[in-house]
Image (tube, grey):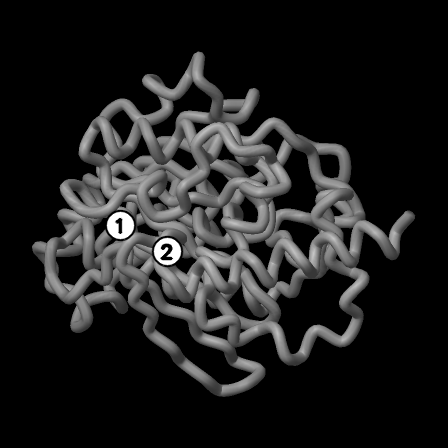
Amino acid sequence: MNKPFNYEQAFSRNIGWVTPAEQQQLRGKRVAIAGGGGVGGVHLLTLARLGITRFHIADFDSFDIANFNRQVGAMMSTVGQPKAEVLARMARDINPEIEIAIFPDGVHKDNLDAFLDGVDLYVDALDFFAFDARQQTFAACARRGIPATTGAPLGMGAALLNFMPGKMTFEEYFGWGDLPEQEKAIRFVVGLAPAGLHRPYLVVPESVNLAEQRGPSTFMACQLCAGICATEALKILLQRGDVLAAPWGMQFDAYRNKLKRTWRPGGNRHPIQQLMLAIGRRQFARMAAAGR
């Protein structure tokens, strides 16, 4: 039996944790998500179920079987189909009123203005190695005063960083500049999760290869990221609740049942971070030597 869609009924079970007026505020918000892979897809669907109705999504890739372990839109029925189109279809199936602008070429310097136009929040879901696109997007958010959040799926947990208007920027925290991509990768790994809760249970170290741009992943981590980032989105968009902004960060690891808040004034310039970066460079050098 086909029933007509009704927004208030569809999201009535959110009421209690949000007020009816707040639910209507969420209904009018616009969120940009770059990347439709492991975290991007589940970000979109989680925020759609929160009742947000306006999205900009960007991804240039299509689904493949190698995506099945972690990507919510990856199924036998979607192999070969554009990720952004599949995810938009899934979101509209949750809420037919959703407005989605699709950027099928991904996000880049030529479409950043359109991608961020009218946006209330940017949620980072780019591939780990999309250094140029990530650097440009966060810089544009900082210029425009757009809150930006990134949730990193690490092991069987998630790490969170928020970059809020007027606070420390992505560039100030990570210190990428014009550095080589190898150094950016090391700084990103160390900066995302200073607590490193995921490291002790990596049972196949050679599965991480920065030079070949590959690493292991789990769907549990992607789901945790989506839950954490959607909660941050709710707080940011409704302007209630404490929002940890960089240089504060947070990592939760479900495998180890641990939660850690971190504070790194100066970001990767902090002495502890400098030590971790030196260790990371040595580890990378050993992996590179072993691979030759």
- The image quadrant of residue 263 is bottom left
Q: Is 199 situated left or right of 50 in this image? A: right
Q: What element carries label 1?
A: helix
Q: What residue is drawn where x is 20% and y is 49%?
A: 26
Q: Position of residue 204 (x, y in %)?
A: 79, 70
Report whether residue 53 is seen: no
Whole-number angstrom distance, CA of label 1 to CA of label 2: 11 Å
Q: Identify residue type, mark 2.
A: Arg
Query: Which of 140 and 36 lies nearest the eye of the viewer?
Result: 140
Q: What residue is drawn where x is 51% and y is 49%?
A: 187
Q: Mark 1 points at which residue?
A: 7
Q: Is 152 situated left or right of 174 in this image? A: right
Q: Mark 2 points at which residue?
A: 49
Q: What residue is drawn where x is 22% and y is 45%?
A: 27
Report whether residue 258 is seen: yes
- For label 1, the crowd category at 10 Å Cα-Cα, with few meaning under 14, some 14 to 19 and many 20 or more, is some
Label 1 or label 2, whichever comes before in sequence order: 1
Query: Which of 283 and 158 lies nearest the eye of the viewer?
Result: 283
Q: What residue is drawn where x is 44% and y is 12%?
A: 110
Q: Identify residue type, mark 1.
A: Tyr
